[in-house]
Image: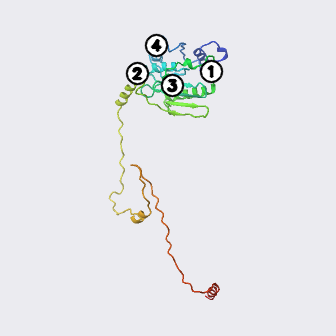
Amino acid sequence: MNRLFFQPHQAGLSKVQAAEHTLRNINPDVLFEVHNYNITTVENFQHFMDRISNGGLEDGKPVDLVLSCVDNFEARMTINTACNELGQTWMESGVSENAVSGHIQLMIPGESACFACAPPLVVAANIDEKTLKREGVCAASLPTTMGVVAGILVQNVLKFLLKFGTVSFYLGYNAMQDFFPTMSMKPNPQCNDKNCRKQQEEYKKKVAALPKKEVVQEEEEIIHEDNEWGIELVSEVSEEELKNSSGPVPDLPEGITVAYTVPQQQEDSVPDVTVEDSGESLEDLMAKMKNM
């Protein structure tokens, strides 16, 4: 986000302060609430939970949606923990360190996989991210990739909140091949987050309580059931002809049939015809034909 929001005159400001200044200049009618702290600490985590629960447009109401644009897995896991505990829907987004790919992911506690259900290897192996980064070397930065991922995220937010189109549970972006993989992931019953498992049970109960839709099968209307004119359908091909024009049926698994079979090829039998030799020459035969 710092590449998208920071401007030269904002040097020295934090990311959130720069974001607020830029956005307020774009639309001064929007209300902003800025908090500049580390959400992974115990004291800040409680305040972060409180703002999700009570920071909606109406006082005391939870927010409609949480968007994650953080740049490390520890912060993502913290957001995931808070949202699982509160049953809060959120969307995660990120760009790879080589800056040529990214993704967005929608997480609905209990209904879809949370961030801990299928964690990245760095998270699953409990590797300290700080040990993976070389001192003095920053991850690659490509604002075009970040702009594409940010646009996809906002588009998904609009579809989710305004209820139109198809909301993506996971949508990736590969800038090298212009490839957009998409998929949906079910929650992991053995997820390490206990609140995720709890939300899964709550979701199952909610689904079970929904009224089941009855499938009504429309009966086909029968026309001319009495057949007063005695009309019958008769095949123009006899059983013998059908048998001769069909080939052997291959041995197929149960439930699979062939549309037709290829008849076995039979060699054409041409009867031998012999002509008696009269002993006449070709000239004599030609003369006879002229006299006819």
* First-in-chain label (2 vs 1): 1
Q: Amino acid at mark 4?
A: Gln
Q: Name above or below for residue 186 compared with residue 129.
A: below
Label 3: state its secondary structure. Answer: helix
Q: Residues within 10 Å of mark 1 (few under 14, many from 20)?
A: few
* First-in-chain label (3 vs 1): 1
Mark 3 or mark 1, which is nearer to you?
A: 3
Disc 1 from disc 4: Cα separation = 29 Å
Q: Amino acid at mark 2?
A: Lys
Choose top left, top right, bottom left or bottom right for residue 143: top right
Q: Which residue is mark 1?
A: 3
Badge 2 vs badge 1, beta-carbon distance below 8 Å: no
Task: In the rendered structure, find residue 251 and report the number of the disc placed on it.
Answer: none
Q: Name above or below for residue 154 compared with residue 240.
A: above
- Horizontal and vertical percent for residue 88? 45, 22
Disc 2 from disc 3: Cα separation = 20 Å
Q: Residues within 10 Å of mark 3 (few under 14, many from 20)?
A: few
Q: Which residue is mark 4?
A: 46
